Amino acid sequence: MPSYRVRMVVGDLRPGVDPATVLPAAADAAAELTAVEAQYLEVVRGEARLTVRFEAADDAAAGVVRHAVVERAGELVDVLVTRVSRRWGARWYPIR
């Protein structure tokens, strides 16, 4: 099954949200729909970026997972930018 990832640039936390709960909650939203391969947090040029890697049968199914992940993260933080990509070999290519 193809590997996909959703990457989010996030901003401020919602009031009362523990920062340590955001990434696990986003990954749990994906896990309700498919197998999660990885989850990680990066800080790039001062921006927090969350990534959830997962399996999906095709681009349409990946879009459904992406929506669930972004919706859940959006309940906890301001989601500023989202991107979903599919892995082909060693490279990631954006899907629309």
Image (tube, grey):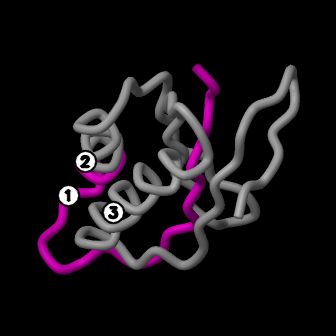
In which quadrant will I find the C terminus?
A: bottom right
Q: Give the class, few, some or many, for how many residues have Cα within 10 Å of label 1's Cα (few <14, many ≥20).
A: few
| Dot 1: element | loop
- Distance Cα–Cα, label 3 vs label 1: 12 Å
Q: Position of residue 22 (x, y in %)?
A: 30, 53
Q: Total of numbered circles in the picture? A: 3
Whether the magenta-drawn stretch holds residue 6 is answered as yes
- Distance Cα–Cα, label 3 vs label 2: 7 Å
For label 2, the residue is 25
| Dot 2: element | helix
Q: Amino acid at mark 3?
A: Ala
In the image, is residue 92 above or below residue 83?
A: above
Whether the magenta-drawn stretch holds residue 38 is answered as no
Q: Amino acid at mark 2?
A: Ala
Q: Position of residue 82 (x, y in %)?
A: 59, 67
- Distance Cα–Cα, label 1 vs label 2: 11 Å
Q: Residue at x 18, y 66 (%)?
A: 17
Q: Position of residue 74 (x, y in %)?
A: 33, 72
Q: Which residues are magenta?
A: 1-23
Q: Earlier in the sequence, mark 3 or mark 1?
A: 1
Q: Are marks 3 and 2 in contact (CB under 8 Å)?
A: yes
Q: Residue at x 75, y 32 (%)?
A: 87
Circle number at residue 73: 3
